[in-house]
Image: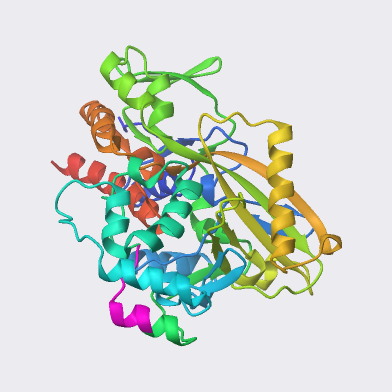
């Protein structure tokens, strides 16, 4: 008798797990809570404008993923030239290497603190604030990444672990700092040199092959999971399974499991994450901006803004532009209509002050809340995550994707996460 494989969640990781299970000779069923598949890579349309959920650009380096995405959709290639908004100035990314627009006093403070910074041993378990001060010096750390950290991650750098940083942050050299402060040069320090985006259909087009699968069941509200009997209860029906792959958040699956040990439930409740608000705007003219930029001003709620129309001309009607601002919130923060309106007004008014457009240029507008935006790397994440994942692993549940693995995964990594689970099942069957 064939084994029955169930996959929870139809985001890229769950879809990938199903696709690769099929390639390995196994049928599966995907249960998706929403009425559309795609997860965080899904998109939406308003008045002829296409918007993704948050900024998405593929920086995949794995050849298998690159070929799969290329087979899924024709794409544009972009060279990353992001920008930064600091006070009332535009500074090329990474800001530490492009200090030229700043006042001389501020440049000297940054250079002085960089030269006399206290260098730490990174092998020790230091927090993110300590890491930032050791890499950049106090002044730059306080005015740039520490402010951005609070806006993007919703907690202070001191509350965060530094383990996640890896190659994502540029470590400057004194010569580059001095050169970038004296001359209006461009030094590309972004960690990816080639970014890909579908020519049409939004970022979701990279999932086109995965979305053709006929085993995706939408609007499936899971009520409980019985690990002993291997039964999932959905509304009025029960589904028996032999093997389970889950891409739903660890915090959510733990709520569903019957007779979950108190230690595991407690750990799952302490796993932290950010929520997000997206302010998406359609503009009736071509705007002058980089493809995306970061904002370091405390009074501006948006942490990051990107232009979907610059990623692909198909994302906006002819002659128009689009912008999407990302605002991040503490997961416990209550979201009301009043709160959303406040965020929308703050975002639009500040984008106007930046000189990007006028109020009457806006011809499409959308604001929406996303419960799960990113995994939050506070200092206890590794302890709590291990407790939950070890339990699931011992119960033969394969956790995949950003929130299934509870890891800072990009789309290509989430895709490979699903493939890995499918390959592990294949290897177990062989043995």
Observer-nearest of 288 and 422: 288
Q: Quadrant of the C terminus?
A: top left
Q: Is residue 111 above or below residue 214?
A: below
Q: Is residue 416 above or below residue 3?
A: below
Q: Is residue 318 left or right of residue 29?
A: right
Q: Is residue 258 left or right of residue 428?
A: right
Task: Residue at 44% x, 50% y: name it.
Answer: 149
Residue that extends furthest to the right in the rendered view of this protein: 360
Residue 348 in magenta? Answer: no
Residue 11 is situated, as x and y percent measured from the top left of the image, at 48, 45
Residue that extends furthest to the top in the rendered view of this protein: 259
Residue 330 is situated, as x and y percent measured from the top left of the image, at 51, 36
Observer-nearest of 183 and 266: 183
Q: How many marks?
A: 0
Magenta residues span 169-178
Q: Is residue 307 visible?
A: yes
Q: Is residue 190 visible?
A: no
Residue 303 is situated, as x and y percent measured from the top left of the image, at 55, 54
Q: Is residue 306 above or below residue 41?
A: below
Query: Residue 314 appears in which quarter of the rendering?
Result: bottom right
Query: Residue 245 appears in which quarter of the rendering?
Result: top left
Task: Residue at 38% x, 69% y: name it.
Answer: 110
Q: Quadrant of the N terminus?
A: top left
Residue 102 is situated, as x and y percent measured from the top left of the image, at 51, 74
């Amino acid at each position: 008798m064939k084994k029955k494989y169930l996959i929870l969640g139809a985001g890229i990781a769950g879809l990938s797990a199903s696709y690769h299970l099929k390639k390995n000779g196994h049928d599966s069923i995907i249960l998706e809570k929403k009425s559309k598949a795609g997860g965080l890579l899904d998109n939406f349309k308003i008045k002829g404008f296409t918007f993704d959920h948050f900024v998405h650009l593929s920086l995949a380096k794995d050849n298998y993923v690159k070929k799969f995405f290329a087979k899924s959709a024709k794409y544009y290639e972009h060279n990353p030239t992001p920008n930064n908004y600091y006070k009332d100035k535009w500074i090329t990314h990474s800001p530490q290497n492009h200090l030229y627009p700043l006042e001389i006093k501020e440049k000297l403070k940054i250079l002085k603190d960089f030269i006399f910074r206290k260098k730490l041993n990174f092998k020790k378990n230091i927090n993110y604030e300590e890491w930032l001060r050791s890499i950049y010096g106090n002044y730059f750390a306080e005015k740039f990444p520490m402010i951005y950290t609070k806006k993007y991650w919703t907690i202070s750098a001191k509350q965060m672990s530094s383990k996640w940083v890896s190659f994502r942050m540029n470590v400057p050299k004194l010569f580059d700092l001095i050169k970038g402060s004296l001359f209006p040069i461009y030094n590309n320090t972004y960690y990816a040199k080639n970014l890909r985006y579908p020519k049409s259909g939004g970022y979701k087009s990279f999932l086109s092959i995965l979305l053709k699968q006929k085993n995706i069941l939408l609007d499936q509200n899971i009520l409980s999971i019985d690990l002993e009997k291997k039964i999932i209860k959905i509304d009025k029906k029960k589904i028996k399974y032999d093997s389970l792959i889950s891409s739903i958040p660890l915090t959510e699956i733990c709520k569903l499991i019957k007779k979950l040990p108190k230690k595991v439930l407690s750990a799952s409740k302490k796993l932290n994450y950010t929520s997000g608000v997206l302010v998406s705007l359609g503009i009736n003219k071509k705007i002058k901006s980089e493809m995306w930029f970061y904002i370091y001003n405390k009074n501006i709620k948006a942490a990051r803004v990107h232009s979907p129309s610059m990623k692909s001309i198909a994302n906006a009607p002819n002659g128009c532009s689009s912008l999407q601002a990302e605002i991040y919130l503490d997961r416990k923060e209550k979201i009301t209509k009043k709160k959303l309106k406040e965020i929308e007004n703050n975002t639009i008014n500040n984008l106007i002050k930046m000189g990007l457009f006028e109020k009457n240029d806006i011809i499409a507008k959308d604001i929406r809340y996303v419960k799960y935006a990113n995994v939050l790397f506070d200092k206890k994440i590794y302890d709590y995550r291990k407790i939950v994942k070890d339990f699931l692993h011992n119960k033969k549940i394969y956790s995949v994707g950003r929130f299934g693995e509870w890891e800072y995964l990009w789309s290509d990594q989430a895709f490979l996460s699903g493939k890995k689970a499918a390959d592990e099942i294949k290897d177990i069957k062989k043995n």
